Image (spheres, rainbow, N blue to C red):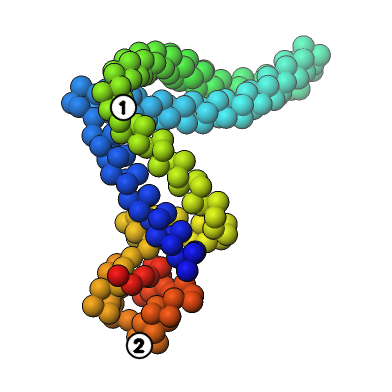
């Protein structure tokens, strides 16, 4: 059956790709340390960027509150200037004191947030510089590493081209199913039947399923793990 043959070839190609990728991912200590440094810096950048966005959002809220508090204070101050009667003047002064107090209550956390934003922006600048330097050093050494593993790099390139060609022969839903299973089943979406059992999950197959496999007229999948099955 052509589709089963294509799926088996795709599984074998995926297996070879995984082997090569493991070899190319096995970085020497100096490269591995640089890679870890870049990732750690990127994590810090992400955390501080999130904190910066939060602080800026809080500033936007507090700024609106401060503008309103300033308007309220200005109105209260104007009322003091236009009041001539003693009782009204005393009330206006109390109102102005209250508005000044409310503005100060908004102004203090707003200034603290502005300082926080400034500090975070400075920290982010330093982290970006550090990340760029580490990334440049990593890229330089990694290029040397890949040159030393040129055969694996070329092999990966050829296997990726073969993978794309095989996938083009299959219906899109089948390709999606294959990769979904491979991702969920340790990279194995197509497995052989051994001693009447699925070699992926070791569940014994029912007689009718074994008969279907021997007929070879349709794709047979394991009832337990859903992997595609084939006979030796």
The tag on residue 207 is: 2
The tag on residue 217 is: none
Mark 2 vs 1, N-terminal side = 1
> Residue 4: where, in percent of width, then height?
45, 65
Q: Secondary structure at mark 1?
A: helix
Query: Is disc 1 surrounded by few (<14), some (14 to 19) or many (20+) residues within 10 Å?
Result: few
Closer to us: 95 or 6: 6
Q: Is residue 223 above or below residue 206?
A: above
Tell whether 62 sits left or right of 84. left
Q: Secondary structure at mark 2?
A: helix
The tag on residue 150 is: 1
Dot 2 and dot 1 residues touching (CB under 8 Å)? no
Q: Quadrant of residue 38?
A: top left
> Residue 150: where, in percent of width, then height?
31, 27
Residue at image location 32% in from the left, 81% down from the top: 205
> Residue 72: where, in percent of width, then height?
71, 23
Res. 214 in view: yes
Q: Is residue 21 above or below residue 207?
A: above
Closer to us: 165 or 225: 165
Residue at image location 18% in from the left, 26% down from the top: 29
């Amino acid at each position: 059956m052509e589709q089963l043959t294509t799926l088996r070839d795709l599984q074998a190609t995926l297996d070879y790709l995984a082997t090569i990728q493991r070899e190319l991912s096995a970085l020497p200590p100096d490269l591995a340390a640089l890679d870890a440094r870049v990732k750690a810096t990127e994590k810090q950048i992400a955390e501080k960027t999130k904190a910066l966005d939060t602080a800026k959002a809080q500033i936007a809220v507090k700024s609106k509150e401060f503008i309103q508090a300033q308007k309220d204070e200005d109105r209260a101050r104007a009322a003091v200037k236009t009041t001539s009667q003693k009782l009204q003047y005393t009330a206006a002064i109390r109102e102005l004191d209250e508005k000044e107090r409310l503005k100060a209550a908004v102004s203090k956390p707003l200034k603290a947030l502005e300082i926080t934003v400034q500090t975070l922006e400075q920290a982010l600048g330093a982290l970006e510089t550090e990340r760029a330097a580490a990334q440049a050093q990593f890229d330089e050494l990694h290029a040397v590493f890949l040159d030393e593993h040129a055969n694996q790099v070329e092999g990966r390139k050829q296997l990726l081209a073969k993978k794309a060609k095989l996938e083009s022969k299959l219906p899109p839903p089948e390709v999606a199913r294959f990769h979904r299973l491979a991702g969920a089943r340790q990279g194995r979406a197509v497995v052989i039947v051994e001693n009447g059992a699925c070699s992926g999950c070791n569940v014994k197959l029912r007689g009718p399923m074994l008969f279907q496999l021997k007929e070879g007229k349709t794709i047979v999948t394991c009832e337990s793990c859903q992997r595609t099955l084939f006979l030796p």
